[in-house]
Amino acid sequence: MKPASIINRGDTFVTLRVSTDRPAEIREALAARDVQHVYKGDQNQAWDAVLANHCLARAVGPASDGVDLTFFVHDERLGTADARLVRHWRSESRRFVLTEDYYRSRSGAVWEHQDISHGVLFSEAVSPEQFAGAGIHIHRLADAWDRQAADCSRDLEWLEALKHLGVCIPGVSPGRCDASGLGPAVQWTGLSELAAEHPSAGLYYALTKTDGLYGLVPVENENRTMAGIPVGDPEIAACLRRLLVLAVRGAVRFSSDPSQRRGILGRGRRVAAWGADFLKANPRATVADLQVAFGVWLTHEIFPADTIEIDRSSRFTRMSASEFDGGELEDHSLHYFLDLALRYPSEFTDSYNDALNRVGFGLQRMKFDPADGVYTLPFFVEFAEADDDGVYRYELELSDPHRSTVLLKNPSRGDRVLEAGHPIDSAEALFLVLSTGLNTSRGFSVVGKAAAFSAELQRAPRGLGLPRQGSKYTPMVDHLVSGLRSRGILRQPTGLLIRIGLNALDRFAALGSIPIRMPEFLRARMGDTVACARFAREWRSVAAQAQQALEWLSRLLPGQEVHLARLLVEGDSSHRRVGKLLRQMGLTAVPDGLKRLAEELGPTVRGVTLRLLDEREQLLERRRTHAQTGPWHLRDRTVDREINRLRESVDTRLKILMAAWVRRLWQRAESLTYVNDRPYTLSLYLAFGLAIFPPICRNVEFDVEWISPCPTPEHDRSECT
């Protein structure tokens, strides 16, 4: 293996990572830490799951080698829609809709995981924090847009320039705009209606949205899980068919070879036929059932020799009396962290909240008040009523000074209150009150939220498999485990985290001269059509150049977007403002990399930007001239207000152009590496058939991570082994 590197650190721990491309070294690492069972879960088997599962199974080896391997569907909620569009969907009598990921604000987001990729290349959502990291504060820009949207939208040349940068704003841009080359918006009418009332909503969507990913979400947030939603529901079935159509169309658009397109259509029909047969044979199947069955089918299509079985998190997290022996949890239990939380509420709360604070996540904090006994836990209880097919998820809370009342919270279904008559101070005590108080014949599951669930699946003697860019909660898990250890309530070691690096885009080299079409965010750099081998050679340099530009921009201050626009289109470092901007970025002259990115703006964007900069200079000169007409308190204030209004309109358009450019940089810098690590398996299958999979699986990289305690706050690698 390569030498270990430190990837995370806290007051009393470091997280170490070693990498290898030799499966035998993975087995050696598992044996060295006595890992006996590895789990790997996904919400969507059509994404990177099938490929990653195959590669992990090959690395870990058969169960006869001493390590069990469980692949599973994490059957949680279906996703989160935009609550502001519920009124629009209700008018259409909709219960399920297709959407894209995007940010509603600095804190709220729309997300889905039952999704499809429109072609092989797609881009991730760009968060407000990412914009802020490049000197653009989108919430301030949104406030200005609320005031100036009507005026700015009259500038048709500016709207066309935005389109060249891959951005269309609902309610402003004409028609059903597809500026990305990765498929049209799926909720354009509803978003346009929303943007007419709240212009900033349209701007947030336009600047933060994914390109080329579409997913299924419920209109109402019922906290209903995938295990309780029938896939045969007419709306669900229609949405899934639509997703497959989008995937096939995206694959056809991605390819520019007629023979490739015929193969795409044939494979699309094959998937559609499988889906129709599945629904006919399983009329009462749920979305979770579909995921399990489709994962098995797609695995067999690509890797016929594999015999992978797929479980579900709701099944193996089901609580039962067999877990307990005299009040102590059995070693195989998956409710150990739940037990810790109930036995040591104060210590667990402090550890959990401190971990959230250290990684800066804006997630719900735990609450524990010893005086009134109110205790909110990071766990969900999932069950179906005896007379209901739906499986619903309830938040778990304890109350009263003795913590003997269990409150299960679900706004759509109503809260459930269970009186235990004794303190709920262990997992067994919770099991007893739930088993006697719930009206269910199919049992119930208690599942941790992301960090708690991940920590449980990594608890020795277990390990957890993840994609190389999977789970943003992993650093939080390290801090949570370390906090519990430092407070003396966790003594068991952690197992291993095994990350799978597929490097799918690198493996395009094996496809040689097969031509593929580029989406908008790559077209200016790589051309309209590129051979697969060339794309494999060049995509990393494209991503690195964008990352370097973002590093320069990270030193900018809010409000400097206008000077950045001047730097890009004029490139004249002798201008006072531009020179100051370069110095702030740590540069003495405009670097070649930035010049090249500026050249990619194209004549339309450059022309509009130069015009707006010229209009801005004229307004500033007009303001200076007007200031000479008399003292501030005596001159005509209406003229001042009009000049300021016009200047804000110009500045808003310039800043949105720069935000669209920064969005393109993030698409290149992060989305390409993300697709490389987490390719959409179904889209690869549609676009290339089976030819792409042997090269991907032949040279897979694995990262092995583990937490190592350190004796001092100041660590070096020799102290943490």
Image (tube, rainbow, N blue to C red):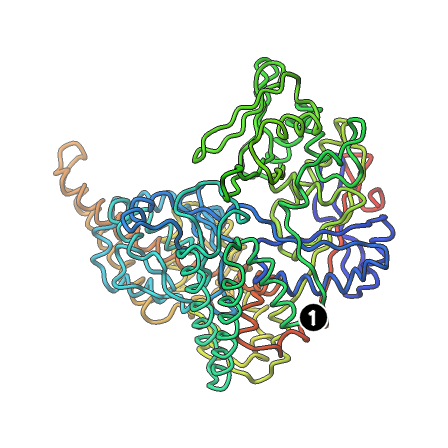
Where residue 294 sits in the image (x, y, percent)? Answer: 58, 63
Which residue: 60% across, 13% down?
401
Q: Amino acid at mark 1?
A: Cys
Q: Circle 1 sits in a helix, a strand or a loop, which is it?
A: helix
Where residue 575 sits in the image (x, y, percent)? Answer: 38, 57
Which residue: 46% across, 61% down?
213
Which residue has dot 1 on it? Answer: 697
Q: Is residue 709 left or right of residue 438?
A: right
Q: Is residue 367 visible?
A: no
- What is the crowding at mark 1: few (fewer than 14 residues within 10 Å), some, or many (at least 20)? some
Number of marks in the image? 1
Q: Is residue 137 or residue 394 the one in the foreground? A: 394
Q: Quadrant of residue 368?
A: top right
Q: Is residue 554 or residue 87 the one in the foreground? A: 87
Pick the quarter of the image with the N terminus: bottom right
Please, is residue 344 above or below residue 670 in the view? above
Q: Quadrant of residue 406?
A: top right
Please, is residue 584 above or below residue 668 in the view? above
Q: Is residue 633 or residue 198 the one in the foreground? A: 198
Where residue 143 sits in the image (x, y, percent)? Answer: 32, 42
Q: Is residue 606 visible?
A: yes
Where residue 230 sits in the image (x, y, percent)? Answer: 48, 52
